[in-house]
Amino acid sequence: MSTSLQQLRDLVRDHDIRAVVSDLDGVLRVFDGALWAELDEITGTPAGTAYHAVLGHPFLDEVVRGRGTHRQWRERSASALVAAGSSPQAADAAIAAWLASPSRIDRAVLEQLDALRGSGLGVFVLTNGTDRVPEELDGLGMTPFLGPGRRFLLNSADLGAAKPDREAFARAQTRIEQELGASLRPDQVAFLDDSTRHVRGAVRFGWRAVLHQGPTDAG
């Protein structure tokens, strides 16, 4: 078990935790880190160009707050690649390769979250996600874990606020309380995320947070 998963277990053991919230990307869902170099090769652009054009595109901030779509983000990312020196055809090919890139669920994280849910805790996923996240998670077989109507998925595109903004945690807290049918103090929520900024934002809001170090399994 990774150090961060043990820290999460310790939080639950030592405090009056009623709900556990996990980040998605970099924690529960992981990607191949070699992808971005491959996209740079496809576009014939300098190292780091594809990453900046896609995940570094400023429009992503709008998309994860529900003010834009994944399709619009893809179109703007392709344009950014062309502006950086890629041909339009290569840019389109790179975006297609990005969309087709495999991801996987970290089974050690999933098993730990399942065990916590089995112990009676509410377990949720809070992601700075797009309108495409439900489709992506269905494709990974996560539908049962997310519950009927994906009730345990807290997607920023639906919440209208994104981590590390305080409003994102406030709206997530409201949703958690609605789903559990009970009022919770912020310090009764444990949070796992691989972003230092997001962990700090959660702590400022009052959640008990752990910085994740992973992935923890090999496949």
Image: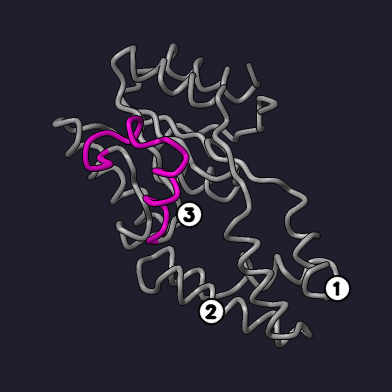
Residue 120, image x, y percentages: 28, 15
Mark 2 nearby-residue class (10 Å; few <14, some 14–19, many ≥20): some
Q: Which residues are magenta?
A: 131-151
Q: Secondary structure at mark 2?
A: helix
Q: On the rendered structure, is 98 left or right of 18?
A: right
Residue 164: assigned label: 3
The answer to which quarter of the image holds residue 185 is top left
Label 1 and label 2: CA atoms lie apart by 20 Å
Q: Secondary structure at mark 1?
A: loop
Q: Mark 2 — residue?
A: 75
**Which amino acid does the dot numbered 1 rest on?**
Pro
Q: Is residue 133 magenta?
A: yes
Residue 94: assigned label: none
**Which amino acid does the dot numbered 2 rest on?**
Glu
**2 or 3: mark nearer the eye:** 2
For the point 70% across and 26% down, which residue is it? 218
For the point 48% across and 19% down, which residue is it? 112
Q: On the rendered structure, is 54 left or right of 132?
A: right
| Quadrant showing the C terminus | top right
Q: Mark 1 — residue?
A: 46
**Which amino acid does the dot numbered 3 rest on?**
Pro
**1 or 2: mark nearer the eye:** 2
The answer to which quarter of the image holds residue 97 is bottom right
94 in relation to 133, above or below:
below
Label 2 and label 3: CA atoms lie apart by 26 Å
Between discs 2 and 3, the one toward the N terminus: 2
